[in-house]
Amino acid sequence: MKTPDYQLKLRELAPSVVFDVSWSHDEDARWPKDCGERGDCMPYNTDVTARAIVGGEVLEGRACMGGTWEIPGKMDPEIGGYLPQMLEEAASELITQKGIPLKIKIELRAVIAFLKTLMRQRWEEQQKEKETA
């Protein structure tokens, strides 16, 4: 699975923070009957985490989304376009954790600003595409 290019930028902006995406089988999800055939898709819970080690403890921010339908082994690294938002949510939660040092807060603020700009740019591109369609 290819890592989106902007995730490399997150490593530059916040070298003290590890961002991760994981999928686990969603036992509760049911395929909507009005969506046609599900093919090889399986339901997953998607978790995006932002973690930092502070004083020997792992501090974490998390964003979760259930009911993402993926083909096993071929997960969409963009989570259907939701990844930037989920990364921003995880970073925003981590920054509020008790004991986060100022250095890491500064890194996280840079990440949050970068992701908000990215999301805004994507939204503007979508609007332009709608206007020309």
Image: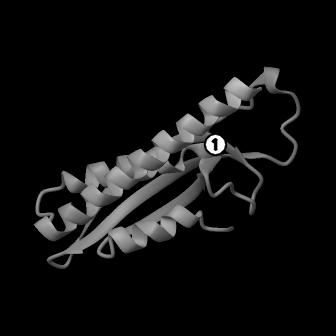
Q: Residue furthest bottom?
A: 56
Residue at the image point whose x is 74% and y is 63% from the top: 73
Q: Is residue 126 above or below residue 2?
A: above
Q: Position of residue 76 (x, y in %)?
A: 68, 54
* Camera sees residue 61: yes
Q: Is 30 situated left or right of 92 in this image?
A: right
Residue at the image point whose x is 88% and y is 43% from the top: 39
Q: Is residue 133 above or below residue 110?
A: above
* Camera sees residue 62: no
Q: Position of residue 10 (x, y in %)?
A: 41, 66
Q: Nearer the viewer, residue 9 or 96?
A: 9
Amino acid of disc 1:
Thr
Q: Quadrant of residue 75?
A: bottom right
Residue at the image point whose x is 11% and y is 63% from the top: 99
- Looking at the rendering, in which quadrant would you find the C terminus? top right
Q: Is 110 situated left or right of 88 in this image?
A: left
- Looking at the rendering, in which quadrant would you find the N terminus? bottom right
Q: Residue furthest front?
A: 132
